[in-house]
Amino acid sequence: MESDRIDAATLATASGDPSPLMQMEHTKTESQMRKNLKRFLVNNRLNLIGVIVVGLFLFLAVFGELLAPHDPYAADITNSKLLGPSLSHPMGTDELGRDLLSRIMTGTRISVQVALIVLGFAVTFGTTVGLIAGYWGGWVDEVLMRLTDMFLAFPALILAVAIAASLGRNLRNTMIALATVFWPWYARLVRAQVLSIKEREFVQAAHSIGLSNSRIMLRHILPNAASVIIIQLTLDVGFAILATSSLSFIGLGAQPPSPEWGTMMSTARNYFRDAWWYMAFPGLALTLTVMAFNLLGDGLQDALDPRSGRR
Amino acid sequence: MIARLIIRRMFFLIFVLFGLSLITFSLSHLIPADPARMIAGPRASKATVEKIREDYGLNDPLPVQYIDYVKGVLQLDFGTSFSSRRPVRDDLGRYLPATIELGLYAFLIATVIGVPLGIASAVKRDSWVDHISRFISISGLAVPVFWLALMAQFFFFGKLGWLPDGQRLPNSVDPPRSITHLYTIDSILTGNWETLRSSTEHLILPVLVLAYGSLAVVTRMVRGGMIEVLNQDYIRTARAKGIANNDVVRRHALKNALLPTVTSLGLQVGLLFSGAFLVEIVFSWPGVGRYAVDAIQAVDYNATMATTLVIAAIFVVVNMFVDILYLFLDPRIAI
Amino acid sequence: MSDKQKATFFQHVLKGRLDRRQVIETGLKLGIATPLLTALAAMPAVVSASPGQRPAPLLTGGQEIDSGTLTIVFEGGTNDIDPHSSYTTLGSMICLGCYEMLVQYKGSSTFEYAPMLAESWEISSDLSTYTFTLPANALFQDGTVCNADAVKQSFIRFRQMERGPYIVIARFVDDPEAQIEVVDDVTIRFNLGRPQPLFLAAMASSYGPYVVSPTAWDEHKTDEDPFAHEWFSFNAAGTGPYRLVENTLNEGVSLEKFEDYHRGWEGNHFSEVFIRNVPESSTRRQLMERGEADATTYNLLASDVEPLQQDDNLQVEIYESTRVNWGILNVPVLGTVEARQGLCYAFPYQENIDAIEKGLLLRSGPVPSTVRGYDPNVFLYETDLDKAKELLIAGGFKEGDSFEYMVSSSSADDKTAAQLFQANMNQIGFDLTITEVDLATYDDMIYGDMPADERPAIMGGWAWWPDYNDSWNQLAPNFLASAMNGGGANGGGYFNERFEELMAQAETFTVEDELDTIMKECQQILVETDPAAIFYGETKYYTILQKGIGGFVPNPLYLGTYMFYDLYREQEA
């Protein structure tokens, strides 16, 4: 899961100082951005696929349950237990005879919710910490960043497993665990941004006219760090969904009868021998979703990040 | 300068490890289930459980337990695992090599395939190589490791019967004499070809599954790094001067591809450990990832604390080395 | 009735011409005292039975044939193989390889006995003293001799350590130093002080009454650990046919043959046993199908059994067990009898049996049909949702109320049943919240001392089988007040005064008919008049074996275990 912090965070780890990337200034004009965005959507087919799949995913998160061909919770164990894919059940049925397509469609919403909550918390907390550390510097920075590094020192999933297990197995605790794992990345990212932004003229100017610290942070620095946060966020939606499913898979996340994809696969393991579809489809749905968010994140990075203005 | 940074990093390491011990200690003691009950097993009476609680010092106040724990850790004594009833250090000695063997091969494969693939796709942008490389780097990070592992197991063991379902070695094959604790290398060193064949067979699926994610990281980083380098002025100049493309790549760009590869090493340690526990669960691989998850689920305080601590420590140490290496390799980074 | 008739009767009994019921019925007609009859009925047909009566391996004319390695697949590991402490299936399985009880249940019988460590035994006519004769050549795996004194020391350890299954001995022996008498080197006598018709049954239990080496105990004991429990948890020193090579939690347990085993190695036996921990049920099935494992018992999905029966390379044994599955009702949380009855009416019994358990479950009350004291006419609920709703409302609940149903995450079939139950409850306007917890938390919830109102309303997927053939032993740890709050498995806080009274009588019963009467009422209370649980039914066990494996005789009391010494692989001609 850590892998996509390569561009921003790892380079920062490398020196213990803000990365060169982050120190580069955003000297883009509005029109350049628009041009980039147009290129991003029209010229690159992969980006387009990403946008379409993400769109479909978000659409299903809202309407999936309504549009599902069957009731995702209605069991009919006597007549339709573990049926293979067919016209009435395009993705087959599960061990209770529930329609898998309907469950996968319904499960979309859970994934979106989880991603929103986990990342919402992680971004808010991480940004706050990063903003304060970067802006104040000195010992505040030192304390906050060493604390952040401590969390970063754990391989993320192992830490999440430990937290989720100690809090008790349910989706809420898993979200807490994941938020705990995700926030330090934002703290570090935002701090690096702040360090570069706060030296810039307009911030100096704001100081000189006597604006309050909080105003400078929120009005002048934060908006300038937004694009980097958004790129990271897009990439992380996929990872948050993936991580939730991984935890659910080992029994820590969502619990049955929830149609969360990882939970479904966890149950499907038992029936794998006779019902490949039960394992295959939720896994494919998950892969596709995460892939789409990664494509989108990559594309956004290409389009919004000045350094990679290379296409 | 570098020496100062290394010393600073060392201090930081000690500080981090201390913090980690505190985090792991608090986390493992937060677990609601009663470890004494776990040790006693079902059907045991309350008196038995109480006795165990007393025996294991679980009735002591938490600060006392923590101080005892840190004292032990300083002497590399992680206490006794509640579940295996053996010193956790011995357990780690047993399971860590299995994970290292897995991770090492996954890393090698990822590097051997990923570096050339990344370079090729950067040089020949938008060619079929580039498409493959982009597909790998996008899908490798998106596909759930456990799902890929189960699918691979289902086909190659369940359907085709080509490869074993899991384990490091079947029970019928004795492990080679321990030299490095890596079965493949030990069996080569001792000339034990049967064991080598068997352990290689057992490695194939878990290693490939684990390597896929790492391959994505390497390919992606090398490609990105190369593109950046190729876009730099001096390379453009070199190209403009008419130096053959291959020559440019070989002389200038390749050297720079080393950088992202080294960086990815640090990253991969984390990625491999995180992926390893899922892969180990699916393939019954007796590694430290599975040991950690088992310990967490079995409310095995000592084992939980020790494994998370050791894994994190390895992670931190490797990253420290990567940082230091980085200093030597990348002239652009000023200290 | 003449003495001659009595003599003939005894002759018949001793030669094994009468079965248990006949012994009692005929004996009663002859006016023989009932305690004696129970004992006679409990005796093996020929007192000095020889190992030859055991399922015979292939006749090999004195040759030793090596069957190689027996691979068993199992789920989970154990950190306690101390025979006097371990209370788990895997623990039993290993102990039955490394140790021996004095006697064992004979074949698949739960009423007859066969020699194990003891070659023969005698029971006094009043059933209060039991004398066992040991073989002269029995050695422990540490090389020391197993004589009567060693057996005594071993039982002292079992009784005094007070761990795990010690009630198996504590019911009969309070002061082992005084009550166990070493008659001579090969003779040991238990003076129980009063008639104890079930002593032999308890001594054949696979939970506890094993004989361990007192020398090993002495060597490994410490001041903090006077019983050397730490050592015995991970090492073994018994008289059994196999010695422990290695026990690793997440890989498995490996045993190898003990050359000096007192029965010798003539005939066809396995020289190595490997119990492999395979966490995935689908993998366990695949290993069996691919011929990479030799045996597995009751740890697949019920729905896996039928397809495996079609597999020509496998043999599937399905047999009666003494295990009952139920969902514990939380009495303080649910309050009224009506509410509990209501829940009993809402459970999808038949659907569970047909669709999930695939017929490997038979309806029953708390006592399975295979155990003494079983009432064949026990009341059984039918699923009746209208009645369920009516009773729940009469019991003080209203529509929309939610009940928490806890289930352990390790059982796929139980989780499926929970969801069916949930659907039923939804249908009558109630909600069932399924909480899935890991096994540790689950056990802790049931055995621990958490206040009742913090426990779930229903703790589903519980199962129990007795240590030996006795219904008191089946019910006591689950439903007596003394088993509440950590004293046992009474996690639902069940208390019923009349039941307590009856159980006190059952503990010391001497005549089986008397036990039947007591138990009939006990079962009625637990099921109908003051329900303690939703009784899903008694399970049928299954063991999957590779085609060539012979010598497997399932016993309803030794569930999930194997008599490794009796098993062999058929040799190709």
Image (cartoon, rainbow, N blue to C red):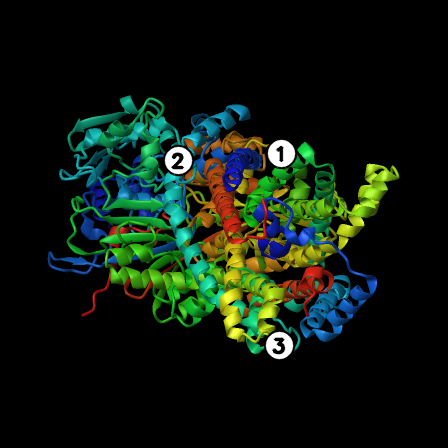
Q: Is residue B304 visible?
A: yes
Q: Pointer 2 indicates a residue of which chain?
A: C
Q: Residue at x 54, y 34 (%)?
A: B15
Residue at the farthest right position = A209
Give the CA distance from mark 3 to mark 2: 53 Å
Q: Quadrant of the N terminus of chain C?
A: top left
Q: Residue at x 42, y 39 (%)?
A: B83
From the viewer's perspective, tell me whether residue C139 is left or right of residue A156. left
Identified by mark 1, the residue type is: Ala
Q: Quadrant of residue C397?
A: top right
Identified by mark 2, the residue type is: Pro
Identified by mark 3, the residue type is: Ser
Residue assigned mark 1: C452
Judging depth in this view, the residue of B234 and B224 nearest the camera is B234
Residue assigned mark 2: C165
Q: Is residue C476 visible?
A: no
Judging depth in this view, the residue of C284 and A141 nearest the camera is A141
Give the CA distance from mark 1 to mark 3: 48 Å
Asked if marks 3 and 2 touch (Cβ < 8 Å), the reply is: no
Give the CA distance from mark 1 to mark 2: 25 Å
Q: Do tags 1 and 2 sit on the same chain?
A: yes
